[in-house]
């Protein structure tokens, strides 16, 4: 898998910075987070539309690569749509580091077709979703969240935007919320 496209997912920086060309320790997947320094991610703003901006953050490269190796064996890690196929709107293209074009439009068309069957369509926009997520929402079990939080200076509150790992964990959290909303 192309680490550069995961590190700078859907971020134009991936065309100028290529972390795949860097040399990493052979056993980085076994590194303790104590052997890596917790650093502040590099923040920058990208225009979102209507004069608004979204803040993306690029974590320390070693911390990201360590986290990638640690979490890449999780279920549906290489298939975001498999986490919640009923509600997922985007399909990841790992070769280009973004979403497959046209997928969202097809889903939107299905929504409009459903308006013929139902009286209402509810559209929710979760403001600052990544900023409200905590690393404690990571899948439970044997996973340590300090591998993930090391990308954000050890902070457990507010996952950083701009990389595939954060997208993966955000989709998992959304699935949990959707299951709660479906309960009678």
Image (spheres, rainbow, N blue to C red):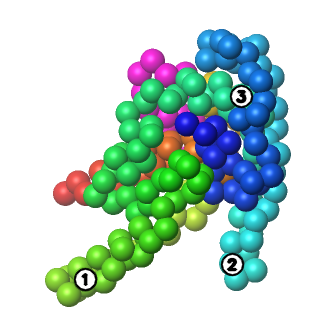
The quarter of the picture where the N terminus appears is top right
Query: Of residues 147 and 29, which is closer to you in this image?
Result: 29
- The image quarter containing residue 36 is top right
- Measured as percent of width and height from the top left, residue 30 is found at 62, 12
Q: Is residue 183 left or right of residue 14?
A: left
The residue carrying mark 2 is 49
For mark 1, give the secondary structure.
helix
The residue carrying mark 3 is 63
Q: Residue at x 64, y 37 (%)?
A: 3
Image: magenta residue range: 133-145
Instruction: Characterize the local packing of mark 1: few (<14), some (14-19) or many (20 or more) Cα atoms within 10 angstroms.
Output: few
Query: Of residues 49 and 105, which is closer to you in this image?
Result: 105
Task: Determine whether 91 is above or below 26 in the image.
Answer: below
For mark 2, give the secondary structure.
strand
The residue carrying mark 1 is 113
- The image quarter containing residue 90 is bottom left
């Amino acid at each position: 898998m192309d680490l550069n496209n995961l590190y700078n997912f859907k971020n134009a920086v991936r065309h100028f910075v290529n972390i795949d060309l860097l040399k990493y320790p052979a056993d980085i997947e076994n590194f303790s987070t104590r052997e890596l320094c917790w650093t502040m991610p590099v923040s920058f703003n990208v225009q979102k539309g209507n004069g608004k901006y979204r803040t993306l953050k690029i974590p320390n490269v070693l911390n990201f690569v360590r986290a990638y190796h640690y979490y890449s064996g999780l279920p549906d890690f290489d298939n975001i749509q498999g986490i919640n196929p009923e509600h997922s709107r985007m399909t990841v293209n790992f070769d280009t580091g973004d979403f497959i074009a046209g997928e969202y439009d097809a889903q939107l068309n299905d929504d409009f077709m459903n308006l013929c069957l139902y009286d209402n369509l509810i559209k929710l926009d979760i403001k600052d979703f990544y900023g409200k997520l905590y690393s404690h929402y990571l899948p439970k079990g044997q996973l340590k969240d300090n591998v993930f939080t090391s990308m954000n200076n050890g902070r457990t509150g507010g996952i950083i935007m701009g990389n595939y790992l954060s997208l993966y964990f955000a989709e998992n959290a959304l699935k949990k919320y959707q299951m709660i909303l479906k309960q009678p």
